[in-house]
Image (spheres, grey):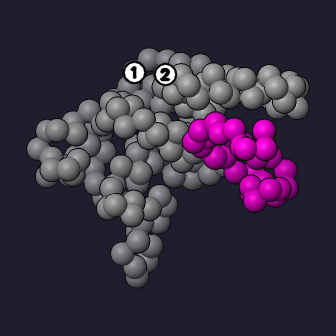
Amino acid sequence: MAAASALAEVPERLKSVFVNEDDEATNGISHNGIYALNMYALMMPVTLTIDDRLPMKKGTNRTLYANIGRDKSVWGPLYEKAFAKFHGSYEALVGGNPEKALNTIAGAPGKMVNHKKITTDDLWDLLRTQDMDRAMITIGCFGGSSNGLVGGHAYSFIKVAKLSNG
């Protein structure tokens, strides 16, 4: 989901994933309940077709995995369903690799950077440059929890910001 969030930071990128967004749809909601999404396998485009039936938590009106957005958007759970279909099951997504997820989304190889192997200034310059280029950036937090980040989780990188104290 971190990779999908990184994708969605630029609305045009998200719109390019949903092939039939304008066909028989109102505000992105398909009238016939069928969605086609673009992904990539070995850097070759693949179109997956899914329906709008989502797994729900028993006895509730909440989705089992990705939630419907606060703005009632359904792209998140639909995208997750297509991603699960692409990889064989929802269970295959547990503990996923954000770099591989971005490869599936973008169709191009990503670059993994170990922040312990470069200087702080070089990391700052890299993040600033990639952010200016509107790159899809995810960050993984391995090991234990620190600075409010949960170990073993991935996060989408929103933007670079220089604080007043440098």
Residue 162 lies within the magenta run: yes
Is label 2 or label 1 in front?
A: 2
Q: Position of residue 118 (x, y in %)?
A: 86, 24
Q: Which residues are magenta?
A: 138-166
Quarter of the view holding residue 22: top left
On screen, residue 87 versus residue 152, left or right, reads left
Look at the picture and state if 12 lies above or below 73: above
Q: Which disc number belongs to residue 124?
A: none
Amino acid at the residue labelled 1:
Pro
| Quadrant position of the C terminus in the picture | top right
View extreme (front): residue: 164
Q: Residue at x 49, y 18 (%)?
A: 43
Q: Residue at x 40, y 45 (%)?
A: 79
Amino acid at the residue labelled 2:
Gly
Q: Residue at x 56, y 35 (%)?
A: 101
Residue 121 lies within the magenta run: no
Q: Please identify the dominant SS of the magenta region.
A: loop
Q: Which disc number belongs to residue 45?
A: 1
The reply to whether the C-beta atoms of the residues labelled 2 and 1 are less than 8 Å apart is: yes
3D distance between C-alphas at marks 2 and 1? 7 Å
Quarter of the view holding residue 98: top right
